Amino acid sequence: MNKKWFFVILVVLGGCCYWFFTKNKHKQEEAKEQPISLKKHSQAFNDNINNVVDSYLSLKDAFIEADTTQIKAKAINFIAAVKNIDTLEIKKDTAAVFETIMATIGDVRSNAESILNQTDITEMRRDFSSLTEMMFPVFFNAIKYEGPTLYLQNCPMAFNDTEPANWISKTKEIMNPYMGKKHPKYQSGMLNCGETVDTIKAK
């Protein structure tokens, strides 16, 4: 082989090797530089919060079915889940943060307990709307939520065909708890009325 061509081939091979190893080195360095996601809370605390969320979602589903007996039963379960939050863990925060979280938990409970005092499903739904407003953004922000992604959804005509109200869902599918399946005027015709207006993600 001509020495000139042999030299050219060596140069090309050397360049390829340099490019390959340099690229891999950069990839490894970039991977090392990626920040590690650290959770603020213990798994036990996050499990408590996930139980609160699951109880809320079950309550929301009872409103979809327009079953007042189930609504009250699910409200009781929700209150129990809120009471079960490990407040000892959040005492690690500053006094101001702790007091804010405790006040928020108290407000969430009060709104849920108000549902138990109602006999009319429309009034129950109004309390559910107030509960939702306490859950997001106040409650989720206060506890620095670390659970699965949730969706804030809105019905523009929840009350009197003119008053909007929100609810929280674990999917983007619209299943409206204010209209439900047995609405006195629309029956199930407005069950899918609404839209997703925000996303609730881990802090």
Image (cartoon, rainbow, N blue to C red):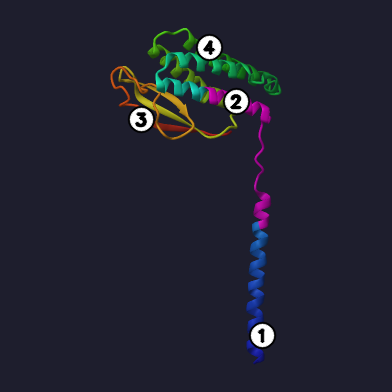
Which of discs 1 and 4 lies nearer the camera? The answer is 4
The residue that appears at 40% across and 31% down in the rendered structure is 174
Q: Are marks 1 and 2 in contact (CB under 8 Å)?
A: no
Residue type for callout 3: Asn
Quarter occupied by residue 19:
bottom right
In the drawing, what numbered circle is on residue 7?
1
Tell me the residue that label 3 is attached to: 192
The residue that appears at 63% across and 28% down in the rendered structure is 46
First of labels 2, 3 by sequence position: 2
Residue type for callout 1: Phe
**Residue 41, can we see it?**
no
The crowding category of the residue bearing disc 3, from other C-alpha atoms within 10 Å (few below 14, some 14 to 19, many at least 20), is: some
Task: Give above or below for 170 relative to 100.
Answer: below
Residue 134 point in image, percent of width and height:
51, 20
Which span of residues is magenta-colored? 28-55
Residue occupying the far bottom of the picture: 2
Regarding mark 1 in the picture, which secondary structure is present there? helix
The residue that appears at 67% across and 19% down in the rendered structure is 87
The crowding category of the residue bearing disc 1, from other C-alpha atoms within 10 Å (few below 14, some 14 to 19, many at least 20), is: few
Quarter occupied by residue 62:
top left
Tell me the residue that label 2 is attached to: 49
